[in-house]
Amino acid sequence: MTRFHLIQGAPLAVALSLLTTAATTAIAKPFTYVNARFGTSCTFPDEVFSITEAEPENGDGQQWSAVDGASLTCSGIYNIDNDTPKGFVAAETANTGPGYKITYSKTGKNWAVLSGIKGDKVFYERRLFGKDGVIRSVWIEYPSSLKPKYDPLSGAIAASLRGP
């Protein structure tokens, strides 16, 4: 029998969502990553994102990959430009790069969410704009053909993004 552990400090809805999603994705268990440099954290099924990529030298985050071509990045950066959630979404919406299109965006007082298409992949990004001058983010990217698998995971993982 597989045991699931609630993530300390995560809202019950996020934990239940991860458990429900986990049950539909080959009993994937949740794993919580915490970045030592910025305190950024996110929770995801490590049986899905099972390949840990090399950590950047600056220690700003971590990336994982899945065998089916999906990837997940959880990181932080200093907000040196004093960016805001609305400013971030406006800049990304104005991006006219080839194959890049925003299909969904939403902002709050200290957060922004974007989803869209980048080439032949779907992406989902959530950013938290901290009072400590750090922007924490989670970026999930996956082949368009895998939307049924990754759309539910993306929402649950993005909702788990936290900072101190």
Image (cartoon, rainbow, N blue to C red):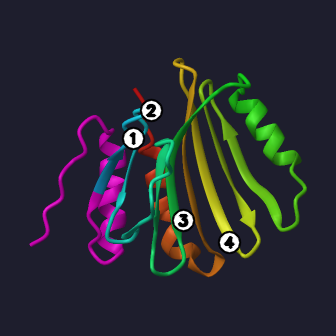
User: Which of marks 3 and 1 precedes in the sequence?
Assistant: 1
Residue 35: assigned label: 1
Is residue 155 or residue 62 the one in the foreground?
62
User: Is residue 125 depicted above or below 45 in this figure?
Assistant: above
Whichever of labels 4 and 3 marks the residue nearer the N terminus, that label is: 4
Q: How far from the left and from the top, in percent, is residue 98? A: 88, 66
Report the residue that reaches farthest toward the top. Answer: 131
Which is in the foreground here, disc 4 or disc 3? 4
Pointer 2 local density, CA inside 10 Å: few below 14, some 14–19, many at least 20: many
Spatial separation of the CA atoms under disc 4 and disc 2: 28 Å
Mark 1 or 3, which is nearer the eye? 1
- Residue type marked 2: Phe
Q: Which residue is mark 4?
A: 121
Q: Residue at x 72, y 76 (%)?
A: 120
Residue ID for mark 2: 38
Q: Which residues are magenta?
A: 1-30
Q: Do tag 1 and tag 2 residues touch (Cβ < 8 Å)?
A: yes
